[in-house]
C-alpha cells in the first residue's frame, strides 16, 4: 500500500479518457436510479393525497381519479392547524435553547483552557449515543409529579437532553476551525472571554451555528417517542404533528383514512423539503463536519 | 462556562442514574413500595417478551444497517463522480432524511398494504399480506428504514470520499490497478474512518428504533423493538421499576456496541496518524 501512497504520478490534469466519456451514459442511468429511489414514494404520497372518493383512494392505480383538494380541507377541519402550531412552537423553542447552550459549551471546549478536553468531548459524543427511551422512565415520573405531562415545557425540556450532545459536537468542530490568534488578539485588546465569543467567534462560525440549528429543528419537529409518551392526546394543548399523523382515525373504526393521512403528511413534509433544498449545503456541511475529521 | 458543562453533566448522567435507581425499586400500580433488589431484572430477563424484542432489534439492526451501508456506499460512489446535476442529486437525497419518520412509516405501511396494495399491484403479487405475517412484516419495516436512511449514510460516506486525493487514484492506475483493485486497495482503506462513523451512527440509531415499527405494525408479528417494549411497560402497564430495568438494559446494550465502535474509530485514527508521521 505504501507504493500507492507515494505521489508517483504528476500527470493528473483531470483530462478524461475515452472510457470515462463512454461511461457517462451509464452514470446518468445510475443517477436516475438514485433519484427514482429517493423520490418515487413521495410521488405516490402526493397523488394519493389528491385522490377523492373511496373508489379512487382504494385503487392502487396512481392515476385513478377524481382528484381534488378535499383531503386537505378535511385535514384542517381536524384541528391539524393546532398540531402544526404546537410542533412549530416546541421545535423553535428547542432550537433556540439548544443552540444557545450548545454554543457556550462548544466555545468552552474549543477555545478555553480546560483540562481533559478530549474526555469531555468524548463524553458529549457518548451522550449522543444515549437511547432516548432511557429518558422515558425517569422523565415520565418527574413530569407526572411536576405536572408537565401534556405541556410544551414537558416536551422541549426533554428534547434539549437529546439535541444538546449532537449540537455541542457539531459546534465544537466548527469553533475549533477558527484561528485561536483572533481570540487572543481580542483578549489583549481588553475583551473578556464572553466578549471574544460574542464579537469574534460567533459571527465567524455563523454557518456552523446555522446548520446545527436546522438539524436540531428538523429532529425536534420529527420526534415521536417522547411526544407520544408525554403529550399523546389533545391538539389544543401540546399534541404534535407526528403524534397526530400516527393517530388519525377514520370515520369508521379500524379503517385508516388514507386520504387525510397522506394529505397531512404532504402538509408537514413540503416545508421540511423546502428547508432542506434551500439550506442543502449548510445541512450537509453540518452533518459531515464531525464525520470527515473522524 | 461551568454552567454549560453542568448542563451537559446533567443531561448525560442524571437520566441514567435516575433510571438505574428506579430499576431497583418495587412498584404496584405506580405506588412506590421500597427497595426491590434485582427482582425487576429477574422478571425482565425471565420474560419471553424481552427476548422477542431483543431478537427483533438485533435482526433489524444487522439487516438494515448492512443494506443501508451497501446501498449508501453505492450512492456515494455514483455521486462522487464529476457530473452535471450533482447538486440536484445531493439535494434530493436529503428528502428521505427530512421526511418525518412517522410520515415515511405511514407511507410505506400504505404501500405494503393489501388494499389499495400499491406494491402488490406494481409487482403483480395479488393479495400478498406483507404486514400481516411474521418475517415479511420485519422485512417491510427494514425496507422502509433502508429507504429512509440509506441516503443519509451516502452523505456521510460521500464526505469521506471527497477527502481522498485524486492523485492516489492516478498513481494506482499508473501501477496498473483496475477499477475493482483501486476500490479495494485505495478507496476502502482510506474511507475507513468515515465508514466507521457512519456505521456507528446508524447502528446506534437502529438499536433505538421506535417510530417505524410502532407506526407500521404497532409491534405485531414479531416487530416489537426494545424501545417499544420499554414504553409499553411505562405507559400501558404502569410499572416504573420494570420499565426502568428494561431501559437500563437497553442503555447497556447501546453503550456496549457504542464503546466497541468508538474504540475501533480511535484505533483507526491513531494508526493512520502514526503512518503519516
Image (tube, coloured by chain):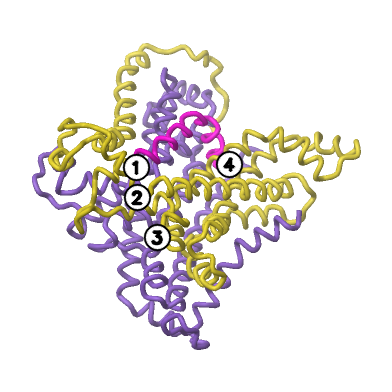
Chain colours: A yellow, B purple
**Real-space CA distance between mark 4 and mark 1, rounded to the nearest whole angstrom:** 25 Å
Of residues A196 and A247, which is closer to you in this image? Answer: A247
Please say if the residues under marks 1 and 2 sit with CB atoms less than 8 Å apart: yes
Observer-side mark, 4 or 3, equals 3
- Graded by Cα atoms within 10 Å as few (under 14), some (14 to 19) or many (20 or more), the crowding at tag 4 reads many
Q: Position of residue A5 (x, y in %)?
A: 55, 30
**Real-space CA distance between mark 3 and mark 2, rounded to the nearest whole angstrom:** 12 Å
Residue that label 4 marks: A212
Residue that label 2 marks: A245
**Real-space CA distance between mark 4 and mark 2, rounded to the nearest whole angstrom:** 26 Å
Of residues B36 and A97, which is closer to you in this image? Answer: A97
Question: Which residue is depicted at the point 42% across and 54% down?
Answer: A235
Question: For numbered disc 2, what is the local secondary structure?
Answer: helix
The chain carrying label 1 is A
**Real-space CA distance between mark 1 and mark 3, rounded to the nearest whole angstrom:** 18 Å
- Are dots 4 and 1 on a single chain? yes
Residue bounds of the magenta highlight: A265-294
Marked residue nearer the N-terminal end (3 or 2)? 3
Q: Position of residue B153 (x, y in %)?
A: 43, 41
Residue that label 3 marks: A233
| Residue B153 drawn above or below residue B86 | below
Marked residue nearer the N-terminal end (4 or 1)? 4
- Graded by Cα atoms within 10 Å as few (under 14), some (14 to 19) or many (20 or more), the crowding at tag 1 reads many
Residue that label 1 marks: A265
Amino acid at each position: 500500500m505504501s507504493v500507492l501512497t507515494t505521489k508517483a504520478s504528476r500527470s493528473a490534469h483531470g483530462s478524461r479518457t475515452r472510457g470515462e466519456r463512454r461511461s457517462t451514459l451509464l452514470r446518468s442511468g445510475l443517477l436516475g436510479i438514485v433519484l427514482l429511489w429517493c423520490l418515487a414514494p413521495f410521488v405516490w404520497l402526493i397523488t394519493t393525497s389528491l385522490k377523492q372518493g373511496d373508489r379512487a383512494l382504494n385503487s392502487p392505480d396512481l392515476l385513478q381519479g377524481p382528484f381534488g383538494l378535499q383531503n386537505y380541507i378535511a385535514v384542517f377541519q381536524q384541528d391539524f392547524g393546532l398540531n402544526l402550531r404546537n410542533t412549530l412552537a416546541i421545535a423553535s423553542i428547542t432550537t433556540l435553547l439548544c443552540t444557545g447552550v450548545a454554543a457556550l459549551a462548544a466555545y468552552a471546549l474549543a477555545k478555553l483552557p480546560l483540562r481533559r478536553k478530549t474526555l469531555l468531548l468524548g463524553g458529549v459524543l457518548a451522550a449522543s449515543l444515549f437511547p432516548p427511551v432511557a429518558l422515558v422512565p425517569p422523565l415520565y415520573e418527574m413530569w407526572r409529579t411536576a405536572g408537565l405531562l401534556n405541556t410544551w415545557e414537558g416536551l422541549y425540556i426533554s428534547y434539549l437532553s437529546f439535541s444538546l450532545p449532537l449540537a455541542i459536537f457539531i459546534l465544537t468542530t466548527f469553533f475549533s476551525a477558527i484561528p485561536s490568534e483572533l481570540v487572543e488578539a481580542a483578549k489583549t485588546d481588553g475583551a473578556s472571554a464572553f466578549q471574544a465569543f460574542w464579537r469574534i467567534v460567533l459571527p465567524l462560525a455563523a454557518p456552523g451555528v446555522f446548520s446545527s440549528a436546522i438539524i436540531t429543528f428538523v429532529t425536534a419537529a420529527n420526534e415521536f417517542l417522547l411526544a407520544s409518551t408525554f403529550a399523546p392526546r389533545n391538539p389544543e394543548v401540546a399534541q404534535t404533528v407526528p403524534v397526530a399523523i400516527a393517530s388519525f382515525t377514520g370515520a369508521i373504526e379500524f379503517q385508516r383514512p388514507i386520504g387525510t393521512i397522506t394529505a397531512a403528511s404532504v402538509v408537514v413534509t413540503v416545508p421540511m423539503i423546502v428547508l432542506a433544498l434551500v439550506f442543502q449545503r449548510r445541512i450537509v456541511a453540518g452533518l459531515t463536519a464531525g464525520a470527515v475529521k473522524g | 462556562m461551568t454552567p454549560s458543562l453542568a448542563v451537559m453533566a446533567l443531561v448525560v448522567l442524571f437520566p441514567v442514574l435516575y433510571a438505574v435507581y428506579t430499576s431497583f425499586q418495587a412498584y404496584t400500580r405506580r405506588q412506590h413500595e421500597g427497595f426491590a433488589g434485582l427482582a425487576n431484572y429477574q422478571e425482565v430477563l425471565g420474560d419471553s417478551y424481552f427476548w422477542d424484542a431483543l431478537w427483533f432489534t438485533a435482526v433489524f439492526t444487522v439487516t438494515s444497517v448492512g443494506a443501508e451501508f451497501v446501498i449508501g456506499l453505492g450512492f456515494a460512489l455514483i455521486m462522487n463522480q464529476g457530473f452535471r446535476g450533482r447538486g440536484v442529486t445531493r439535494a434530493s437525497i436529503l428528502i428521505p432524511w427530512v421526511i418525518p419518520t412517522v410520515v415515511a412509516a405511514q407511507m410505506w405501511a400504505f404501500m405494503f398494504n393489501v388494499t389499495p396494495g400499491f406494491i402488490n399491484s406494481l409487482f403483480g403479487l395479488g393479495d400478498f399480506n406483507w404486514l400481516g405475517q411474521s418475517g415479511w412484516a420485519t422485512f417491510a419495516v427494514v425496507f422502509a428504514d433502508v429507504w429512509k436512511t440509506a441516503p443519509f449514510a451516502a452523505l456521510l460516506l460521500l464526505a469521506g470520499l471527497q477527502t481522498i486525493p485524486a492523485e492516489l487514484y492516478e498513481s494506482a492506475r499508473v501501477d496498473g490497478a483496475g477499477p475493482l483493485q483501486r476500490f479495494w486497495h485505495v478507496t476502502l482503506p482510506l474511507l475507513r474512518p468515515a465508514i466507521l462513523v457512519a456505521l456507528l451512527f446508524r447502528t446506534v440509531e437502529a438499536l433505538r428504533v421506535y417510530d417505524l415499527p410502532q407506526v407500521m405494525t404497532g409491534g405485531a408479528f414479531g416487530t416489537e423493538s426494545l424501545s417499544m417494549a420499554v414504553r409499553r411497560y411505562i405507559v400501558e402497564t404502569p410499572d416504573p421499576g420494570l420499565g426502568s430495568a428494561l431501559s437500563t438494559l437497553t442503555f447497556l446494550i447501546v453503550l456496549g456496541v457504542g464503546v466497541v465502535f468508538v474504540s475501533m474509530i480511535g484505533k483507526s485514527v491513531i494508526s493512520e496518524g502514526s503512518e503519516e508521521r
